[in-house]
Image (cartoon, grey):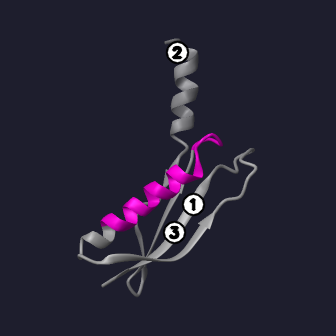
């Protein structure tokens, strides 16, 4: 593969942002995912974020209760890339 294509692809891949699970207090957490480009589907981002939430709650053998889900709105251009944020609790 030509290097002139590899470097831009690597730079774009480095722009994706994943918060990991962030505690917000009172057994409430937040997880967010943002794509590196406008070509990533929102469904993939949301599924990855939900998997993280379920993994967090499984640590204490609890279930996920989604409190709020916030998604970016199209058009996905000029830095407005697909992004999802999920706020959740781990409940019995």
Q: What element does badge 2 sit on?
A: helix
| CB contact under 8 Å: marks 2 and 1 | no
Look at mark 1 in the image and give the residue it sits on.
84
Look at mark 3 in the image and give the residue it sits on.
86
Query: Is residue 2 rendered to the left or right of residue 75?
Result: left
> Which residues are the magenta region?
36-55
* Closer-to-camera residue (3/52): 52
- Please tell me which of labels 2 and 3 falls first in the chain: 2
Q: What element does badge 3 sit on?
A: strand
Give the percent coordinates (x, y) of residue 92.
Answer: 30, 85
Q: CA distance from mark 2 to mark 3?
A: 37 Å
Q: CA distance from mark 2 to mark 1?
A: 32 Å
Residue found 46% across the figure and 56% down from its top:
47
| CB contact under 8 Å: marks 1 and 3 | yes
Look at mark 2 in the image and give the residue it sits on.
3
| 28 w.r.t. 16: above or below | below
- Please tell me which of labels 2 and 1 falls first in the chain: 2
Give the percent coordinates (x, y) of residue 80.
Answer: 70, 51
Quadrant location of residue 27?
bottom left
Query: Is residue 13 rendered to the left or right of residue 50?
Result: right
| CB contact under 8 Å: marks 2 and 3 | no
Give the percent coordinates (x, y) of residue 51.
Answer: 38, 60
Few, some or many C-alpha atoms within 10 Å of disc 2 (few <14, some 14-19, many ≥20)?
A: few
* Closer-to-camera residue (2/66): 66
| 37 w.r.t. 72: above or below | above
Quadrant location of residue 83?
bottom right
Residue found 52% across the figure and 15% down from its top:
3
| 68 w.r.t. 6: above or below | below
- Of badges 2 and 3, the one in the foreground is 3
């Amino acid at each position: 593969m030509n290097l002139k294509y590899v470097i831009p692809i690597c730079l774009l891949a480095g722009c994706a942002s994943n918060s990991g699970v962030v505690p917000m207090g009172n057994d409430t957490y937040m997880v967010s995912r943002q794509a590196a480009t406008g070509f990533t589907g929102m469904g993939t981002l949301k599924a990855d974020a939900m998997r993280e939430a379920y993994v967090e709650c499984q640590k204490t053998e609890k279930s996920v209760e989604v409190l709020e889900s916030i998604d970016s709105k199209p058009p996905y251009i000029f830095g407005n890339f697909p992004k999802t944020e999920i706020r959740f609790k781990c409940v019995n």
